[in-house]
Image (tube, rainbow, N blue to C red):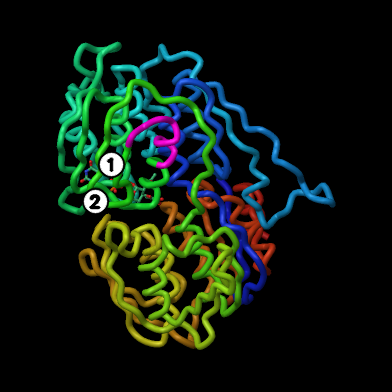
Amino acid sequence: MDNFLIRGGRPLHGTVDISGSKNSSLPILAATLMADGPTTLHGVPRLSDIDSMLLLLKELGCRIERRSPPSLGDSGKIDFAGRPALNGPLEIEVVDATNLECHYDLVKTMRASVCALGPMLAKRGRVYFSIPGGCAIGDRPIDLHQRGLEKLGATFRREGGYIVGEVPGGPGGRLKGATLYLGGARGPTVLGTINVMCAATLADGVTRIVGAACEPEVADCARMLNRMGAKISGAGSPELVIHGVERLTGVSHTVIPDRIEAGTFMLAAAITGGELTLRNCNLDHLIAVLDVFEEAGLQVLRPDPRIDEVIVSCPDGIKPAEMTTQPYPGFPTDIQAQLMAALSLANGASVITERIFPDRFTHVGELNRMGARILKEGPTAVIRGVGANGLKAAPVMCSDLRASAALVLAALAATGETCLDRVYHIDRGYEKIEQKLIAVGAQIERLDEQSAKSREAA
Ligand code: EPU
């Protein structure tokens, strides 16, 4: 397991290219299971979660090719700013549709493999899906996915840790359009909406999904499906109407920029007192985030409204703020931990409430090890900013993807050398994070376990 050694206290300056969205790419990759013919995807980031999804697609009979990037530039060297164009397009085509099993070994490494449920049912008529186990960010049930698919006529039974799902008439049969509600106690479900939307594209008749998730990742997937021949309207709003079609064909699609990565790099500029230019950054997907960031003292400027490029700084230091996570268009849970790291340096007290995953607070103890003063009470954290006293380096442990990003931010701001253990969590969702940070002035070294131990002993 790799570690990061981060020497903090350096303001970051320069340009960062935001990658294609992980959370858009994952369900879009799963949706390619429904296409006849090859699908070409542009901008899919190189991440371990994407590798896990590709492995699953391979198991399910897909041919997958990552084509060469268009060019490496004049020097012929890889550009460490990590331009998305450096990732060649991915071509995916189903060549053998006989396997119906999403195996535990693959599902346990990545919960997003649940996105295969809807496409598999719609296209292959039956699926054996391993029930995902525990998760560091709290309980992650899939009851809403199942309920939505049941409304379309699917049946489910449990067998030895697996869910066996079937359409009426089994393989060769078809789901049937229906009106259904997908809102849960904690609001709508993102992947649940995408699963049911995918399944409904090939169903017989019209489906109306009420209480749908409005996240840009849902709309991105719908855009690709419509290009494939689906008839989806309302994506990005709480009500979707889907007229079922008989088949979908492969197309070419570019995934949207990663709004969570963009928010994280904005906070990296603020927490280090630097200034970053972010390219491939869609501010329309970040309106609630910018509202809170503004309260926290961040300045985000877009010099040319025709170009998705922004300049981020925090000219007067970080100010206290209040934030509650909400479904889109509210502030996303996936930036909660990173915001908390930044607010721990404010001059004054901030309050954060986590409404989507109320137990998503594994970063609190680790941030406190670095000198933060955060008190958690139920789903709420009170952050007493340490202001000029700053954070101090300490050995810390990554426990989930966004908690790890928060620790990287804290380490970039802290005095001294922070050792972050288990950075494989961050590799799941941030493409080339250390190269991108090094290119703008951070001091980060990736060490394998052995080197980290020798370094500690020396
Ligand atoms: N929920 C249920 N039943 C369900 C599904 C969800 O009760 O069947 C609850 C969840 O427990 C949670 C809420 O509904 O309280 C919302 O969960 P949602 O289903 O929307 O989460 P998801 O679709 O499984 C995606 C992202 C997460 C992100 C959430 C919320 C992907 C691959 N994952 O998960 O991303 O936090 O939406 O926006 O898109 C991350 O990238 O770090 C990450 C965890």
Tell me the kind of residue under disc 2: Pro
Q: Which region is colored magenta?
A: 223-231
Q: Which residue is mark 1?
A: 193
Residue 229 on the magenta segment: yes
Residue 205 seen by the camera: yes
Q: Quadrant of the C terminus?
A: bottom right
152 or 135, which lies in front?
152
Q: Earlier in the sequence, mark 2 or mark 1?
A: 1
Residue 436 lies in what quarter of the image? bottom right
Spatial CA span between label 2 and label 1: 10 Å
Give above or below for 126 relative to 448.
above
Rendered residue at 65%/67% (across/down): 442
250 or 314, which lies in front?
250
Q: Secondary structure at mark 2?
A: loop
Residue 238 badge: 2
Residue 245 lies in what quarter of the image? top left
Question: Circle 1: is it few (<14), some (14-19), or many (20+) Cα within 10 Å?
Answer: many
Q: Looking at the picture, how far across and down is residue 396, in whole percent?
A: 48, 61
Q: Quadrant of the N terminus?
A: top right
Residue 305 on the magenta segment: no
Tell me the kind of residue under disc 1: Thr
